[in-house]
C-alpha cells in the first residue's frame, strides 16, 4: 500500500515509498489555516484542543519549517504582515474544517545582543505561556546547529525540562541540515540530545526535505494520543 490518489501532497524523494503514517500526518498538517493573531499572550483565545508551539531565535528557519510541514506558503504571510512580527499567530489543524489541534507560531527572539530588558521580558512571556496555557501540549524549538544555542534557547531549555517530566512534549529541530556535513550533523544531533533533557531531537532540511515525515508523524501522534496511526 502506498499513496492513495486522494492522499495529501506529501513531499517525497523520487522513488521512495510513502509510509501510511507519514501520508496521514502530512495530510493533517496540510489542513493548516490561519486562526487568529494576538499581540500578547493574554489576548489568545482559550482553546480546548492540543496546542503545539513553535519557538526559536529569528532566522533559525521557523517560518520555513512551518511552511514546509504544512505545505502552505501563505501561512508565512500571516506572520509577515507589518506590525505582526512580534505577535503570536495561531493556525488551526484538522480535516473537514473540524479543528483538532492548533499550531502556535511564537515571536522569534533576537541574536545574542538583545538588550537585557528584552531578554527578561521574553523569559517572562515564555514562562507565563508554559504555566498558563492550559491546552499546551508540545513545544518545538527550532535551532540552527551552525550557531548552536543562544542564551534564550538555554533559558527555554531550563524552563521546559521540568515540564517534560510532567508530560509536556518537547522537540528540538536542528534546521538547515543541508549545510552540515554528515559528521557535523551527527555531532550536532548527539550534543543536542544531551541538552534536550528527555525531549526529542531531529535534523531537518527544507531544501533537501530531510526529517519532514519524521517530524510530521511525531506532531500527529502528540496531537492524537488516543488514535492509532494509519496502518
Ligand atoms: N539551506 C537552507 N536554508 C534554510 C532552510 N530553512 C530556512 N532557510 C533559510 O534561512 C533563512 C531564515 O529562514 P526563516 O524561515 O525566515 O527563519 P525564521 O526567522 O526563523 O522564521 C532564510 O533565508 C531561509 O531561506 C533550510 O532547510 N536549508
Ligand atoms: Mg519567521
Image (tube, helix red, strand yellow):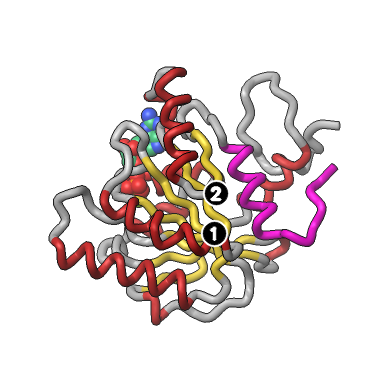
Residue span colored magenta: 212-231
Task: Tell me if I can see residue 26 in this picture.
Answer: no
Dot 1 or dot 2, earlier in sequence: 1
Between 81 and 24, the residue placed more toward the observer is 24
Picture layout, residue 186 above or below residue 226: above
From the top left corner, tell me how far across and down residue 162 is, in percent: 49, 62
Provide the residue designation for mark 1: 164
> What secondary structure predominates along the stretch shown in magenta?
helix
Tell me what residue is drawn at x 59 percent, y 43 percent. Answer: 215
Q: Quadrant of the N terminus?
A: top right
How far is the residue under mark 1 from the one under mark 2?
7 Å
Picture layout, residue 216 above or below residue 15: below
Does the magenta run of residues contain 144?
Answer: no
From the top left corner, tell me how far across and down residue 94 is, in percent: 67, 61
User: Residue 223 is drawn in which quadrant?
Assistant: bottom right
Looking at the rendering, the quadrant in which ligand 1 lies is top left
Horizontally, is 150 left or right of 69 in the view? left
Pointers 1 and 2 in contact (C-beta within 8 Å)? yes
Picture layout, residue 158 above or below residue 208: below
Q: Secondary structure at mark 2?
A: loop
Q: Quadrant of the C terminus?
A: top right
Neighbour class for label 1 at 10 Å: few (<14), some, many (≥20)? some
Picture layout, residue 201 above or below residue 226: above
Does the magenta run of residues contain 224?
Answer: yes
Q: Which mark is residue 198?
A: 2
From the top left corner, tell me how far across and down residue 28 is, in percent: 67, 52
From the top left corner, tell me how far across and down residue 214 is, in percent: 62, 38
Tell me what residue is drawn at x 75 percent, y 42 percent. Answer: 21
Number of labels in the image equals 2
Amino acid at each position: 500500500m502506498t499513496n492513495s490518489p486522494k492522499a495529501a501532497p506529501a513531499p517525497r524523494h523520487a522513488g521512495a515509498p510513502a509510509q501510511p503514517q507519514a501520508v496521514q500526518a502530512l495530510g493533517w498538517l496540510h489542513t493548516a489555516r490561519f486562526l487568529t493573531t494576538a499581540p500578547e499572550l493574554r489576548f489568545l483565545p482559550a482553546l480546548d484542543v492540543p496546542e503545539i508551539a513553535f519557538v526559536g531565535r529569528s532566522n533559525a528557519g521557523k517560518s520555513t519549517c512551518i511552511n514546509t510541514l504544512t505545505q502552505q506558503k501563505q501561512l508565512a504571510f500571516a506572520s509577515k504582515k507589518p506590525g505582526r512580527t512580534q505577535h503570536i499567530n495561531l493556525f488551526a489543524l484538522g480535516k473537514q474544517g473540524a479543528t483538532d489541534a492548533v499550531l502556535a507560531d511564537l515571536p522569534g527572539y533576537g541574536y545574542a545582543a538583545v538588550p537585557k530588558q528584552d531578554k527578561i521580558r521574553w523569559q517572562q512571556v515564555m514562562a507565563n505561556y508554559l504555566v498558563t496555557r492550559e491546552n499546551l501540549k508540545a513545544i518545538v524549538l527550532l535551532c540552527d546547529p551552525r550557531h548552536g544555542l543562544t542564551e534564550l534557547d538555554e533559558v527555554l531549555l531550563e524552563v521546559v525540562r521540568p515540564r517534560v517530566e510532567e508530560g509536556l512534549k518537547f522537540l528540538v529541530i536542528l534546521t538547515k541540515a543541508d549545510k552540515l556535513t554528515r559528521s557535523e550533523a551527527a555531532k550536532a544531533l548527539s550534543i543536542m540530545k544531551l541538552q534536550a533533557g528527555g525531549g526529542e531531537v531531529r535534523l531537518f532540511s527544507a531544501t533537501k526535505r530531510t526529517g519532514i515525515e519524521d517530524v510530521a508523524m511525531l506532531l500527529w501522534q502528540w496531537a492524537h494520543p488516543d488514535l492509532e496511526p494509519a496502518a
